[in-house]
Image (spheres, helix red, strand yellow):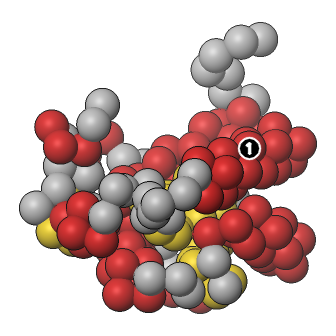
Amino acid sequence: MASASKNLSNYDASNIPDASEMQFGIVISDYYPNITHALYDGCYETLLAHGAKPENIYTLQVPGAFELPAGARILAGKHNPDAVICLGCVIKGETQHDEYINQAVANGLMNLSIASGRAFIFGVLTPNNEEQAAERAGGSHGNKGIEAAVAAIRMAELKRAGKEGKKPIGFQ
């Protein structure tokens, strides 16, 4: 669903598991820091709001969005979190660079998820311009960082439920 018709910050908090025993990694791109740091703030505050402890949230900064998968792998290897959230912004320009970067990041994170059995969350904005990015980093369309944090908590809970022998969700 396009974020123009959905506020990225709206969700049913009563359906979000308690994150007090979970560990999270957040990898943040330094490119467009006014945007990515706003995403980080939304993400971090949402994790805390659902019980995550500050000492169980690990952060790593990388130069740009293209480096998010490598940073995510480094962070996951060092801290072994339940889920890793990757935050960045790639604004469409005059060339197709955005398509190449977005595809590479999405594929890299999906490959990490499949190979490791751990969620690597794609919290990357892919707007046409900086105004659209700002609208999705705490502006009129909410904050993608909040949405990414909620996805991470839910996916971490699915992983934990599987380890505890609860009935699996999905394919068996």
Image side of residue 137 versus residue 72, left or right: left
Q: Is residue 12 visible?
A: no
- Quadrant where the N terminus sits is top left
Q: Is residue 91 visible?
A: yes
| x, y percent for residue 13 | 25, 50
The amino acid at mark 1 is Asn
| Residue at x-position 86% and y-position 47% | 116
Q: Nearer the viewer, residue 116 or 154?
A: 116
Indicate the secondary structure of the residue bearing disc 1: helix
Q: Is residue 163 above or below residue 73?
A: above
Mark 1 residue crowding within 10 angstroms, few (<14) / some (14–19) / many (20+): some
Position of the C terminus by quadrant: top right
Residue 70 location in percent, x, y? 82, 69
Above or below, 8 against 46 in this view is: above
Q: On the picture, is 128 further left or further right than 82?
A: left
State the residue lying farthest toward the top: 172
Q: Residue at x 68, y 83 (%)?
A: 62
Task: Single out the residue that lies furthest toward the front.
Answer: 94
Q: Report which residue position mark 1 lands on.
A: 107
Q: Residue at x 61, y 38 (%)?
A: 158
Q: Position of residue 40 (x, y in %)?
A: 43, 78
Q: Residue at x 62, y 69 (%)?
A: 65
Residue 66 sits in quarter:
bottom right
Number of labels in the image equals 1
- Nearer-the-camera pick, 5 or 55: 5
Question: Toward the viewer: 86 or 166?
Answer: 86
User: Residue 53's spot in the image, x, y percent?
Assistant: 50, 80
